[in-house]
C-alpha cells in the first residue's frame, strides 16, 4: 500500500505542472489585466506602466512562469495583486467554510441516499423504485442556482425557518453555524444524493446477482439480512468513488452555491480572482484545488484497498 | 467593477423624481430623512447596524481605491477636508474654513483637537503628508484628482496653503471624497501595504475599523472620542456584508437579516415599496450612464453615423421599459441633481426620418452593422436588447458582445470597440463628469471615444479657471449642446439609487453622492 | 458549480463505474437495445427527446411569435390566451423563446459531447493501444484536465474566444474529454487481452487493424451509454454557465440563459423561469431515462 501511495504521489508532479502551465497560459491569453481593473478610474498611463514593471507583468510569459515556479519551490505562493495579501493566507481562510459545506452536503446526501437506494434495489421495478428513480432525477436535473433560489423562497422567505445568506462557523457556534449552512448544504446535497442513490442502487443490483448472494438466499436468509451482511460492503466501493470524486469538486466547485448564499468559500474566491485578473491568486487557488482533487482520488484508492482487499494486489 | 459602478433602482414615477431633485437641489434643509412616525423620538445609543452590499470592497486605503463600494465604508471611518450637504453644497469637514487669496492659492484652517483612531494628532503636517502621498505613492489612483495641486505648505500647526499649478474651480468638490480623506501618517508609514486590508487606527471618522473578513463581513465600531460632540455616532457597530445576488440581498432585508441595502434593482422597487417591513429612500445620484462611440475607427469615425444612432434611440422608452422610471433620460453627462444641470436642453428625441437622412449623409443609406460591448449584468443586457430592437427600426444592425468588467475596461483603454457601455458613478462637481472624458488626451485615459475637439477643450479648460458658478453653468450648457452634436457618447439615463431600510433605522440623510453616512443614524 | 459543471464530474463518477461489456458482437448490442426499448421508462424518455428534437428542427413553424419581437408595453404579462407561457421583461413571448431555445440547448449538449466523445475516444484508443510513454503522457494530460476547476476553464476559454456559445461548447468539450478517454482506454486494455484478439494478431493482422476491426466495435457500448448521459449534463452545464454570464449572446436564447435572465423575477413573474425550466427538466430527464435503459440493456450484469 505504501508503495502504491508513493508511486501515485510521484505521478501527480507532471499533472500539477500541466495544470499550472495551463492556468498560466489561459489567464494571460484572457483580455484585460489586473492593473487596468485596479486602476480603472486612473487616467495616468505611466503610473500603470510603472506598476506593471514593478510586478513583472511586462516580461515574457515563460519568464513570468519560471519566476512563479521558482518562488513556489521555495514554498511561496505569492501575493494577491489586488490587495497584497499572501495567497496562502487568503486560501486557507476560505478552505474552512468550503470544507464544512462539503462535509455537510455529503452527510445530507448519505442520509437521503442510503434508505432510498437500498429500498429501490430490493423493491426493484416497483412503484417505490420508480419513485426513487424520479426523486434522484429531480435532484440531478434541476439547475443548481434555481434549486437554491427555490429553497430560499420556501424555507427562508415564506416559512422563515432558516437564514438565507451569510456564514457562521459551525465550529464556533454549532447551532447557528449549522443553520446558516443548511440551505446551501441541501442545495448541494440533493444533487449529490441523486447520484449516490443511483450508484448505490445499481451496484446493489450487481452485487445481488453474484453467486455468493444466491447461496446466502438459498440458506433462507431474508433479503434485508442478505443485503446487510453480504451485499452492502461490496456495493460501497462505487459509492466511495463517487463521493471521493465529489469532495474535490465540492471544495473548489461550489461557486454558484457560495455566490447565491453569500458564503466566503474557495469557489467564489477563484471566480472573483478570475474576474479581477488577479493572476497570482488564481494560479495559487487552482494549484491548491488540483492538489485537493488529486489527494481525494488517492484517498479513494486507499479506501478501495481497505474495503476490498482483492484490489490491493492489483 | 470600478467604473461600472452603480446599478440603479427604485420605482419612482417621473413626478416623484422631479420632486426629489427639487428637494436635493433647491429646497432648504428638509432632506428626505425622517420617514416614520417614530422619527420625532430622541435618538438612542446602541445596537449593530447590518448593511448589505452588492459586491465586496476592494481596499481600505482611500488613496488607492478605484471602487465605489469602498467609498461607502470610507465615509464612516475617514473624513475629508470638506464635505457635501444634501444640496451638494460644500461645508466644513476636517477643515473649519478656507480662503482663496488668489486663483492659484487655497488656504485651509484645520480643525483643532481631532485625533486619528491610533491616538496621533491630525494637524497641518498630517494633511501635507496625505497630499504628498497621493501625488507620489506608485499605486495612487488619486494622482489625476490632485494633479492641479503643485505643493502644500505648512503655514502653522493648523493651517495649510495649497499652491496650484492652475486655477481649479472643481478642487473643493474633489476634496469632499477620497482625494480629501486624511489617513494617519503613522499608520501609512508603519503599516503602509497592510492598510489595504486593515484600516485599524487610520481614520478620524465617527467609526473605527475593527476587522474585515473578505467576502464575509467588515466591522466598524463607534469612535468614543469623536471630535464632533453634536449628534451621533449613536450606533455601537456597523457590520457590512457583501451579498452578490440582488434577489437574495432583497430577501435578506425583507426577512430582517440585514437592516440596510445599498441599492434596490428597478425590477424590485414596486415589491419592496409594497412591503411594510421595508422603508425605501430614493436617492438621486450623480451618475451618468452612456455608451462611448469610437471616433478613431469606422463606422463611428463618421459623425453622421453617430447621429444616426442617437436619433434612432428612444430614451423615454428605455427609461420606462428597462429602468422602470427609476431614473430620467439623460440630456448629457451632467445629472439633474447638479447645479450645472440645464433643464432647457432636452434629451435627444427619436426621429427615424432624421436618422435615415443621417445614414444617407454618412454614406450608408441602407444602414450598417456594428458591435456594442457591454457588461454582463442583467439590466445592461436588457437595455442592450431594447437598443438593438430600436436600431433595427432604422435599418441599423447591432451585435451585442457581453464581457466581464476586466475585458470591458481593457477594450475601452485600448480603443478596441465600436460602441461600449460606460457607467460613471459621478462626481459632485460637473468637472468630474466631463473633463477626463472629453478633453483631448494622448495614450490611455477615460476618453475612450478618442474625441478631440478644440472647442470642447477650450470650454473644459475655461470651466476650471472661472470661479463663478453662474459663469461655469453657462459653459457646461454650451458643452452639453456640443456633445449632443459631436456625440462622443450617446447618453441614456441618470439613474436614481434607491436604498432600502428596515423601519428600525432612523436618521439617515440621503446625500446625492449615494454614500451612506451613519454618524447620525440610530436604531429604534 | 457542483450542480452543473459538476454534472461533468457526476458523469465522470458514473463513467468510472461502467463495466466493459462481457460479450463482443454486434448482434448482442442490438438485442440489448431491443431490451432497452422494452424497459418501461425508456419509451417515455425517448418520446420526450424525440419531441425536443422535432421542436428544435421545426422551430420556425411551431413558434407562435417572433422570439425576438419586443413589446415594452406588455412586459411580464402572465400566461393567457395571447401568450400561453406569458411574456418576459421586454415583452417577448416566452413560449416562442423556449421553442427557439430548444435548438441552442440541444445543440450545446450534442456538439460539446460529440467533441468530447471524438477527442476522448481517440486519445483513449491511442493511449491504450500504444501503451508505455504515450499512454503515460496522454493520461497525465487527462488527469490535469480533470483536476482543473471546470468553471475556471470555462471562464478563461469564454474570455479568450470571446463571449458566445463557441467558448462554452469548447470548454464543455474539454471538460468531458477525460471521461471518454479513460473509458476508451480501459476498454482497449481489457478487450486487447482477450483470446479472439490474440488470435487475430496471430493470423498476422496489424495492430491498428486489430484495433479498428475488433477493439473499437466492442468498446463502443459504454461510450454510447456515457454519451447519452453526458448530453443531459452538458445541457444543464450550459444553463449554469449562463448564471456566470457565459454562453449564448443576446438576443438569442437558450433555456439556461432564459432561466438566468428570469431569476430576478421569480416572485413577480415565475413563468419566465417556469417555461424554460420545465423544458430543460423534461429533456434532461428524458435523456437520462434513455441513457439508463441503454446502460441496463448493454450491461448484462445489471439485467434482471
Image (cartoon, coloured by chain):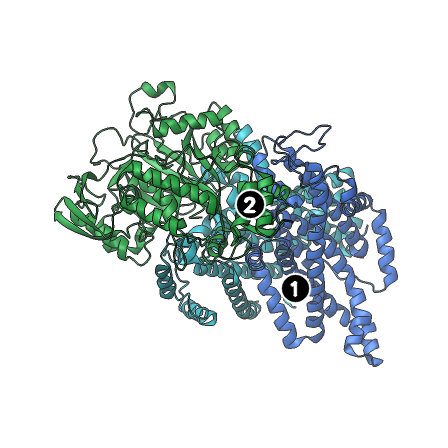
Chain colours: A cyan, B green, C blue
Q: Which chain carries label 1?
A: A
Relative to B190, does residue B11 appear above or below in the rendering? above
Q: Nearer the viewer, residue C281 or A167?
A: C281
Disc 2 versus disc 1: distance between alpha carbons?
70 Å
Q: Which chain carries label 2?
A: B
Image x and y of residue A152, in percent:
55, 35
Disc 2 designates what residue? B309
Q: What element carries label 2?
A: helix
Relative to B522, does residue B55 appear above or below in the rendering? below
Residue at 80%, 65% in the rendered image: C218
Image x and y of residue B120, in percent:
18, 46
Q: Residue A153 shows which numbered tag?
A: none
Residue at 21%, 44% in the rendered image: B116
Tell me: A166 left or right of B137: right
Q: Residue A311 shows which numbered tag?
A: 1
Residue B511 seen from this side: yes
Q: Nearer the viewer, residue B505 or B68?
A: B68
Amino acid at each position: 500500500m505504501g508503495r502504491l501511495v508513493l508511486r501515485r504521489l510521484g505521478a501527480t508532479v507532471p499533472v500539477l505542472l500541466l495544470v499550472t502551465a495551463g492556468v498560466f497560459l489561459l489567464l494571460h491569453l484572457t483580455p484585460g489585466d489586473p492593473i487596468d481593473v485596479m486602476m480603472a478610474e486612473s487616467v495616468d498611463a505611466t503610473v500603470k506602466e510603472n506598476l506593471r514593471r514593478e510586478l513583472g507583468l511586462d516580461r515574457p510569459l515563460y519568464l513570468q512562469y519560471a519566476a512563479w515556479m521558482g518562488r513556489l519551490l521555495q514554498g511561496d505562493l505569492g501575493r494577491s495583486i489586488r490587495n497584497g495579501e499572501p495567497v496562502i493566507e487568503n486560501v486557507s481562510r476560505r478552505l474552512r467554510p468550503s470544507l464544512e459545506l462539503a462535509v455537510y452536503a455529503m452527510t445530507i446526501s448519505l442520509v437521503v441516499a442510503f434508505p432510498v437506494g437500498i429500498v429501490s434495489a430490493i423493491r426493484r421495478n416497483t412503484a417505490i423504485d420508480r419513485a426513487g428513480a424520479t426523486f434522484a432525477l429531480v435532484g440531478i436535473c434541476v439547475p443548481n442556482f434555481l434549486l437554491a433560489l427555490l429553497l430560499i423562497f420556501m424555507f427562508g422567505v415564506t416559512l422563515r425557518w432558516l437564514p438565507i445568506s451569510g456564514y457562521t462557523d459551525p465550529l464556533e457556534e454549532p447551532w447557528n453555524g449549522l443553520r446558516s449552512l443548511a440551505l446551501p448544504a441541501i442545495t448541494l446535497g440533493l444533487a449529490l444524493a441523486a447520484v449516490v442513490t443511483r450508484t448505490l442502487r445499481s451496484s446493489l443490483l450487481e452485487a445481488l446477482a453474484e453467486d455468493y448472494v444466491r447461496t446466502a438466499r438459498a440458506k433462507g436468509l431474508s433479503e434485508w439480512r442478505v443485503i446487510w451482511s453480504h451485499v452492502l460492503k461490496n456495493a460501497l466501493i462505487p459509492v466511495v468513488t463517487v463521493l471521493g470524486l465529489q469532495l474535490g469538486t465540492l471544495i473548489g466547485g461550489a461557486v454558484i452555491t457560495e455566490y447565491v448564499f453569500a458564503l466566503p468559500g474557495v469557489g467564489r474566491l477563484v471566480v472573483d480572482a478570475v474576474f479581477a485578473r488577479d493572476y497570482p491568486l488564481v494560479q495559487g487557488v487552482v494549484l491548491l484545488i488540483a492538489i485537493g482533487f488529486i489527494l481525494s482520488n488517492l484517498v479513494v484508492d486507499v479506501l478501495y484497498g481497505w474495503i476490498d482487499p482483492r484490489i490491493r494486489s492489483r | 467593477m470600478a467604473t461600472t459602478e452603480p446599478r440603479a433602482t427604485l420605482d419612482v414615477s417621473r413626478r416623484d423624481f422631479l420632486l426629489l431633485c427639487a428637494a436635493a437641489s433647491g429646497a432648504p434643509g428638509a432632506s428626505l430623512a425622517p420617514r416614520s412616525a417614530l422619527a420625532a423620538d430622541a435618538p438612542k445609543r446602541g445596537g449593530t447596524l447590518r448593511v448589505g452590499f452588492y459586491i465586496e470592497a476592494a481596499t481600505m486605503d482611500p488613496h488607492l481605491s478605484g471602487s465605489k463600494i469602498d467609498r461607502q465604508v470610507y465615509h464612516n471611518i475617514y473624513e475629508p477636508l470638506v464635505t457635501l450637504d444634501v444640496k451638494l453644497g460644500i461645508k466644513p469637514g476636517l477643515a473649519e474654513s478656507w480662503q482663496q487669496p488668489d486663483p492659484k492659492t487655497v488656504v485651509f484652517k484645520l480643525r483643532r483637537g481631532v485625533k486619528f483612531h491610533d491616538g496621533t494628532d491630525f494637524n497641518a503636517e498630517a494633511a501635507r503628508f496625505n497630499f504628498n502621498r497621493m501625488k507620489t505613492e506608485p499605486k495612487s489612483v488619486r494622482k489625476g484628482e490632485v494633479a492641479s495641486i503643485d505643493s502644500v505648505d505648512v503655514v502653522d500647526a493648523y493651517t495649510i496653503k495649497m499652491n496650484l499649478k492652475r486655477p481649479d474651480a472643481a478642487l473643493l468638490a474633489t476634496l469632499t471624497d477620497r482625494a480629501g480623506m486624511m489617513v494617519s501618517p503613522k499608520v501609512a508609514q508603519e503599516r503602509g501595504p497592510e492598510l489595504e486590508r486593515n484600516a485599524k487606527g487610520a481614520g478620524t471618522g465617527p467609526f473605527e475599523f475593527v476587522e474585515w473578513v473578505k467576502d464575509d463581513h467588515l466591522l466598524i465600531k463607534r469612535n468614543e472620542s469623536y471630535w464632533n460632540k453634536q449628534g451621533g455616532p449613536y450606533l455601537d457597530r456597523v457590520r457590512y456584508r457583501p451579498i452578490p445576488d440582488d434577489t437574495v440581498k432583497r430577501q435578506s432585508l425583507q426577512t430582517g437579516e440585514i437592516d440596510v441595502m445599498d441599492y434596490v434593482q428597478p425590477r424590485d422597487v414596486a415589491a419592496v415599496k409594497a412591503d411594510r417591513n421595508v422603508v425605501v429612500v430614493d436617492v438621486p445620484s450623480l451618475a451618468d450612464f452612456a455608451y462611448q462611440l469610437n471616433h478613431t475607427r469606422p463606422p463611428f469615425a463618421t459623425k453622421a453615423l453617430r447621429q444616426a444612432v442617437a436619433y434612432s434611440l428612444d430614451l423615454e422608452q428605455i427609461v420606462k421599459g428597462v429602468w422602470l422610471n427609476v431614473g430620467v433620460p439623460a440630456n448629457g453627462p451632467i445629472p439633474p441633481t447638479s447645479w450645472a444641470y440645464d433643464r432647457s436642453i432636452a434629451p435627444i428625441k427619436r426621429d427615424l426620418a432624421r436618422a435615415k437622412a443621417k445614414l444617407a449623409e454618412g454614406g450608408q443609406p441602407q444602414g450598417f452593422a456594428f458591435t456594442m460591448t457591454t457588461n454582463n449584468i442583467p439590466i445592461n443586457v436588457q437595455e442592450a436588447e431594447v437598443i438593438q430592437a430600436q436600431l433595427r427600426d432604422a435599418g441599423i444592425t447591432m451585435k451585442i458582445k457581453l464581457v466581464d468588467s476586466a475585458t470591458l475596461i481593457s477594450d475601452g483603454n485600448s480603443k478596441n470597440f465600436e460602441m461600449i457601455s460606460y457607467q460613471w458613478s459621478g462626481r459632485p462637481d460637473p468637472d468630474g463628469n466631463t473633463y477626463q472624458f472629453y478633453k483631448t488626451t494622448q495614450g490611455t485615459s477615460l476618453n475612450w471615444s478618442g474625441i478631440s475637439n478644440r472647442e470642447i477643450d477650450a470650454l473644459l479648460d475655461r470651466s476650471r479657471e472661472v470661479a463663478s458658478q453662474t459663469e461655469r453653468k453657462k459653459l457646461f450648457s454650451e458643452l452639453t449642446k456640443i456633445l449632443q452634436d459631436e456625440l462622443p457618447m450617446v447618453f441614456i439615463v441618470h439613474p436614481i439609487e434607491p436604498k432600502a431600510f428596515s423601519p428600525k433605522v432612523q436618521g439617515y440623510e440621503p446625500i446625492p453622492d449615494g454614500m451612506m453616512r451613519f454618524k447620525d443614524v440610530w436604531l429604534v | 458549480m457542483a450542480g452543473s459543471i459538476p454534472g461533468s464530474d457526476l458523469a465522470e463518477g458514473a463513467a468510472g463505474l461502467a463495466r466493459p461489456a462481457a460479450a463482443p458482437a454486434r448482434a448482442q448490442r442490438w438485442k440489448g437495445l431491443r431490451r432497452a426499448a422494452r424497459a418501461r421508462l425508456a419509451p417515455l424518455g425517448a418520446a420526450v427527446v424525440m419531441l425536443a428534437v422535432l421542436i428544435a428542427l421545426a422551430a420556425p413553424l411551431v413558434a407562435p411569435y417572433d422570439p425576438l419581437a419586443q413589446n415594452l408595453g406588455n412586459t411580464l404579462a402572465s400566461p393567457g390566451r395571447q401568450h400561453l407561457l406569458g411574456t418576459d421583461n421586454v415583452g417577448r413571448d416566452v413560449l416562442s423563446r423556449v421553442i427557439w431555445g430548444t435548438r441552442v440547448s440541444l445543440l450545446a449538449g450534442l456538439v460539446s459531447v460529440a467533441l468530447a466523445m471524438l477527442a476522448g475516444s481517440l486519445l483513449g484508443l491511442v493511449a491504450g493501444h500504444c501503451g508505455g510513454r504515450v499512454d503515460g503522457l496522454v493520461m497525465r494530460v487527462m488527469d490535469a484536465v480533470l483536476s482543473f476547476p471546470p468553471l475556471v476553464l470555462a471562464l478563461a476559454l469564454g474570455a479568450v474566444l470571446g463571449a458566445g456559445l463557441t467558448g462554452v461548447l469548447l470548454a464543455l468539450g474539454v471538460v468531458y474529454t477525460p471521461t471518454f478517454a479513460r473509458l476508451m482506454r480501459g476498454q482497449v486494455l481489457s478487450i486487447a487481452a482477450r483470446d479472439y484478439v490474440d488470435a487475430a494478431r496471430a493470423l498476422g493482422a496489424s495492430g491498428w487493424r486489430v484495433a479498428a476491426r475488433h477493439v473499437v466495435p466492442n468498446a463502443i457500448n459504454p461510450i454510447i451509454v456515457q454519451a447519452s448521459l453526458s448530453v443531459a449534463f452538458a445541457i444543464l452545464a450550459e444553463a449554469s454557465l449562463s448564471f456566470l454570464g457565459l454562453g449564448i449572446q443576446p438576443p438569442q436564447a437558450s433555456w439556461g440563459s432564459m432561466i438566468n435572465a428570469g431569476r430576478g423575477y421569480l416572485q413577480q413573474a415565475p413563468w419566465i423561469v417556469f417555461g424554460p425550466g420545465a423544458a430543460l427538466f423534461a429533456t434532461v430527464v428524458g435523456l437520462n431515462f434513455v441513457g439508463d435503459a441503454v446502460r441496463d440493456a448493454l450491461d448484462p450484469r445489471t439485467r434482471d
